Image: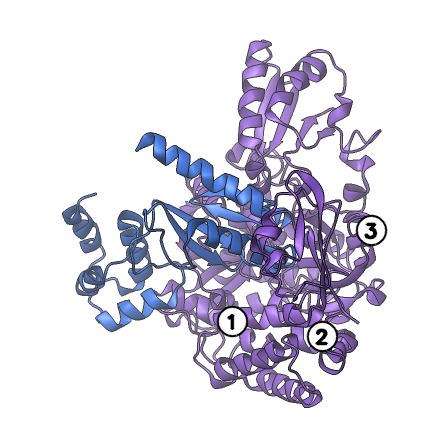
Chain colours: A blue, B purple
Amino acid sequence: MSTSALSERIAAYAGRPEDLIQVLQLVQEELGYVPEEMEERVADALGVSIGRVHGVVTFYHLFRTHPAGRHTIRLCLGTACHVLGADRILAAIEEALRVSVGDTTDDGLFSLDVVRCLGTCSLAPVMMVDEDVYGRLTPERVLGVLRTYAKREGRSG
Amino acid sequence: MSARELLVCSGTACRSAGAVEVHRRLATAVAESGLQDEVLLVETGCMGPCAKGPVLRVMPDDVLYTEVRPEDADEIVREHLVGGRVVRRLLWAEEAVSPSDLPFFAHQRKNVLANSGAIDPGRIDSYEARGGYDALKRALTEMTPEGIIEAVTESGLRGRGGAGFPTGRKWRFTYDAPGETKYVVCNADEGDPGAFMDRAILEGDPHAVIEGMAIAARAIGAERGYVYVRAEYPLAISRLKVALEQARERAWLGADVLGTGFAFDIEVRIGAGAFVCGEETALLASIEGRRGAPRPRPPFPAQSGLYGRPTLINNVETLANVRTILRDGVEVYSAVGTESSKGTKVFALAGQVRHTGLVEVPIGTTLRELVFDIGGGVPAGRELKAIQIGGPSGGCLPAELLDVPIDYESLTEHGAIMGSGGVIVLDDTACMVSVARFFLDFTASESCGKCVPCRVGIPTMRDILVRITDGEGTLEDLDRLKELAGLVKSTALCGLGQTAPNPVLSTLRHFEDEYLAHIEDRICPSGVCEALASSYAIDPEACRACDQCAKVCPTGAARGTPGEPPYAIDQALCIRCGACFKACPFGAVMRGAGS
């Protein structure tokens, strides 16, 4: 979607401050994150202060203020995952990708996020890559999963 | 009509284990065998035994296959569907052909989950064929709003989201509140780590929630409803949206339902990742497009909720119960359960338990039945240490309390809560101080920051736990913890803060010896706390001689020959830095508890 098309869609919410979160979700869906200049544009369109927009963006974990990688890894750190060794999975990902939580790899391939619970506790430890769930992770298996994504990108790119 | 149904579980867990491919291969095999008119292939919601996925069931033969791989599809079609012979190697256990032959299912009583795993959640016909929307029809044509509220009150249904407030009373308050415009809100912001029943209900039987909301709307006089669902559940969101569209097409939702003049429609609002939004006033703030900060009650949402209007907020599972009360009648419904807690409860079993998954039992079932008879107990060679129930607001119960019945009062009496139904089983490898610290890390980072007791009190408690797990705790710390816990509990603004001390209080109550071991003896009895580790060793069974430990070991203590397991650690050289523990890809390095 072009920037002007996105602006048009945002404009459709004019005067509806209650739809702020939905509009920000729309922005993130299109751009992968919520750039600072978009906060301003959204504020203008909905008739709310930039402060309120920024407050919402920074309150909710799922809004990004920096560009995301092509794939987003969401590693679950919920209770079941925790007791079954999620910290070792995290260490393995951080080391293999040389990335820390909240950041994106230098090649722009992966962003690494941790989440509170993916609700797939029966397969703990669990992560999602984009919308796909991978369960019963071991440090070995997680590296295998990441390699398949990297390989696929290598082929297509 | 097809002679046979092939039900393929397509819940999140089974999908991630390969159910989509299994379904595709089955469809091809069915078509190749020319059976497409005799066999109906159905993608269902969760069947429960997530650890055994992908699972599928052949009806009406009632045969359950587990851990099915795509390459098994041809054999299932050839042997079972064509040849009429059960494929024994794909059964859960020898001679356990039907679900009812397995303790996992035999000890359950499915009411809310009756449709999940049995119908196609993507087809409203499938729901209607099993009596779907009959309860709404009754509510609209045979009952008054007062009568509906009375039935729900008499059923004894209590809120399944955590606190267990009587549902009928909540409906009554909202009904009585003055105002033309009222709202029904479904809380599907299932945030407790370890809970996934609401996800499963939305994925497996979304119409049950829609029907429950419509009945509630009829009862309290609402024309608009919202489902607030967390963004982490993409499959649940898409199935809910499909179901809403179909319900509108069939006019179960809309301007004039069944020609009765009843108007009601539902919008979906997707969360943006904030645990506190499970708290009802924070949830409403979020629907209004604001930061999800709670506000003091009263006024309760029943008086002044969404946009200042009277608002009924119920959780997914609560709403899914409603239609069964109207369908079966109050007497049948309330015959299940205990004196003070009626009906069934869905639990999510996870952690160190053999049969992880989703189960439903009558309220009053004991923890033992839940964890051992249904869950199969802890993995071989381990011992049960504790059952964490109720998430970050709940507590840890020790193995000695296995015979406690699961109901709201009994669990509270022992320091846990029913909560939303997440049950995490902990075996003897778990450190209870670390578990308490884990939950406070969670609540500290999820606190919205509005009130001081939560914003400052919880991190202060967490810091004490960090000291203890780092081997720097003192006995005074325990008193300080208890004092702070009492303060936060009694002064925090909302449920998040008020219940946050529970994991600490319950572990102090039932596992004080572990705290004392950390403080007085500087030992972590389970070998979890890195700072207290006294030795490292390699499990010869788990070692695969990958050489990773030797590569990172700074003193050359970890060594062996690549490709020739096992490696070993020379205790005389080991400086207990823990590098090998972190590096091992197979979890073969064990931390010793020390002496």
2 or 3: tag closer to the N-terminus: 3
Identity of the residue drawn at 78% across and 54% down: B371
Where does residue B168 sit, x and y in percent of width and height? 61, 65
Q: Are marks 1 and 2 in contact (CB under 8 Å)?
A: no
Where does residue B137 sit, x and y in percent of width and height? 55, 45
Disc 3 is attached to a residue of which chain? Answer: B
Which SS class for mark 2?
A: helix
Look at discs 3 and 1 and give the one toward the viewer: 3
Q: In the picture provided, is B188 more to the left or to the right than B87?
A: left
Check if mark 3 and mark 1 are on a common chain. Answer: yes
Above or below, comparing residue B495 to residue A83 in the picture: below
Tell me which amino acid carries mark 3.
Gly
Tell me which amino acid carries mark 2.
Ser
Disc 1 is attached to a residue of which chain? Answer: B
Q: CA distance from mark 3 to mark 1?
A: 57 Å
Say which quadrant the N terminus of chain A sits in.
top left
Q: Quadrant of residue B385?
A: bottom right
Q: Residues within 10 Å of mark 2 (few under 14, many from 20)?
A: many
Q: Where is mark 2, residue-wise?
A: B506
Q: Are marks 2 and 3 in contact (CB under 8 Å)?
A: no
Q: Nearer the viewer, residue B454 or B302?
A: B454
Which SS class for mark 1?
A: helix
Check if mark 2 and mark 3 are on a common chain. Answer: yes
- Residue B176 is marked as 1
Which SS class for mark 3?
A: loop
Q: Where is mark 3, residue-wise?
A: B381
Q: In the picture provided, is B289 more to the left or to the right than B231?
A: left
Q: Nearer the viewer, residue B484 or B128?
A: B484
Look at discs 2 and 3 and give the one toward the viewer: 3
